[in-house]
Amino acid sequence: MLLLLELAILLAAAVASAPLGPALAFALVMVLSMGTLGMYQHDQSREDIKSTLLRIMPSFVLGFFLMQLLAGLLPVLRLGSMVFLLGGGAVLVARMVVFTSAQSSMLEQRLIIVGDGAMARECLELAARSISFHPFRVVGFVPVTGELRAVPPAMLLPSDLPLLTLARRYAADEIVVTVGDRRNGAFPVRQLLECALGGVPVTDAATFFEREACQIRVDSLQPSYLIFGGGFDQSLMRAAVKRLFDLLASAAIGVLALPVMLATALAIRFEDGGPVFYRQERVGRDNRIFQVLKFRSMRQDAEGDGRPQWAAEADPRVTRVGHWIRKLRIDELPQMLNVFKGEMSFVGPRPERAYFVEQLCEQIAYYNVRHGIKPGITGLAQVRYRYGASVEDALQNVLGLTFKENCPDLRNSKVADLIRELQSYGLQVHVHDPVADADEALHEYGVRLEAWEDLPCAEALISAVAHRELAARPLRQMLDKIAVNGCFIDLKSQFDADALRGSGLNVWRL
């Protein structure tokens, strides 16, 4: 909806001062540029004016360069700079209006979730975060025989009533199916069909997560999703359009970025006298090996021991020049050659080394499916997440959820806002509170409380509430929940900072 709205706005802005043909080309190129830089992801509905402006500016710069390239080939497409300024302003205003109205209760989507297990609970948490262009409200869960219950009992709906009756009684806008085993007789196939025919959309959990959180949950993925899903379209027309865009964009950016690339090459050479470029074998489409080309941003002996290592956000192997070119993504510019040659695309999953691909295929179901398309310079991971060193790099442990220490009162909890903010950056947040009620936390905030033993080893441990029981835990137990060189964030200054630092942790406290 947002894409079509902005396409119409850009077309209207250009038609005011240009013929229809150039105006249409302008609108299409601008929308394509914004989509390429991730401006149609679902996690932007809470952005303020400043954040939205910072996203629009690089998109319009890219679009301007592409339009200049097209105008060089077809002079009739040349447009004045005022069109770009007017279009950018119109898009900014439109986005703020859409995002502001999107959180209105009038647009609230009411959900019924079929299932009461762990995946049903995950859907409740996602709905509570409400990162979509409209808020969600889960009106209840329909229990299914055979699942281990993980949702608040107070939210269970009568299982003896037909689903269509429940949907109409609770004015449900959508039904989300979270049941994993659909082969037993308890799965309500006929009732779901009645709902679909009765005008109530039915969605499975994997589709719901992909649509609302831009995540593919492999733990809820059915093989049929990969077979019938629309996101796996490999038609000739789609491939031709994508290849045409890759050729035009890589040629345009490669030429326009030549001064920046030359300055970068001189800086790298001047710093340590080593090679300017870095070539490495990566796994591409259909598992073919190719040489990826980048500006060298690490020391020449970065892997002196011969063992492949993940890159980290504050990697000590990164040079001074490398720090800045990685921060600005200038190190990726030489990959325009990979795109032009057809080994990569602008948008797609980042290519990994064969050593890591073998590990990830063992850890992540369907990981090898990504090799059915070309790898890309940028993808969802680059738009939403930062450089990661390991699986733990995306994990955060939060201790405490209640409003006040040593008290089970969850009303007006500020920690819930902290959790949502962390999740908005794509981080996986695990929460432990020894005095809070787990069902109330899930119902009020969509936060699932975990036992201490179930907390993972994470990059950071955040002490948010000063419960006595937490302070009494031995330091050794705390260290077990934080990765090597991880960070301990003590918001209440409850713990001994010197002891934590002496154990090798990075400590931050108020």
Image (tube, helix red, strand yellow):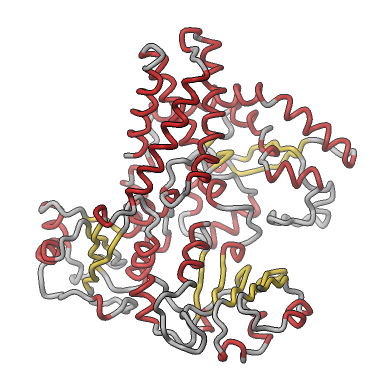
Q: Where residue 101 appears, x then y in whole percent?
A: 32, 48
The answer to whether residue 31 is seen in the rendering is: yes
The answer to whether residue 240 is seen in the rendering is: no
Q: Quadrant of residue 119?
A: bottom left
Q: Where residue 69 appears, x then y in whole percent?
A: 56, 17
Q: In which quarter of the image is the N terminus?
A: top left
Q: In which quarter of the image is residue 54?
A: top right
Q: Nearer the viewer, residue 383 or 107?
A: 107
Residue at coordinates 66% horizontally, 89% vertically from top-left? 474
Relative to 55, say whether 238 is above or below: above
Answer with left or right where residue 339 lies relative to residue 155: right
Q: Nearer the viewer, residue 2 or 201?
A: 2
Relative to 127, say whether 224 is above or below: above
Residue at coordinates 46% horizontally, 36% vertically from top-left? 35
Q: Nearer the viewer, residue 287 or 39?
A: 39
Q: Where residue 162 appears, x then y in whole percent?
A: 10, 67
Q: Which of 386 and 187 is in front in this view?
A: 386
Q: Quadrant of the C terminus?
A: bottom right
Residue at coordinates 56% horizontally, 66% vertically from top-left? 395
Residue at coordinates 38% horizontally, 19% vertically from top-left? 24
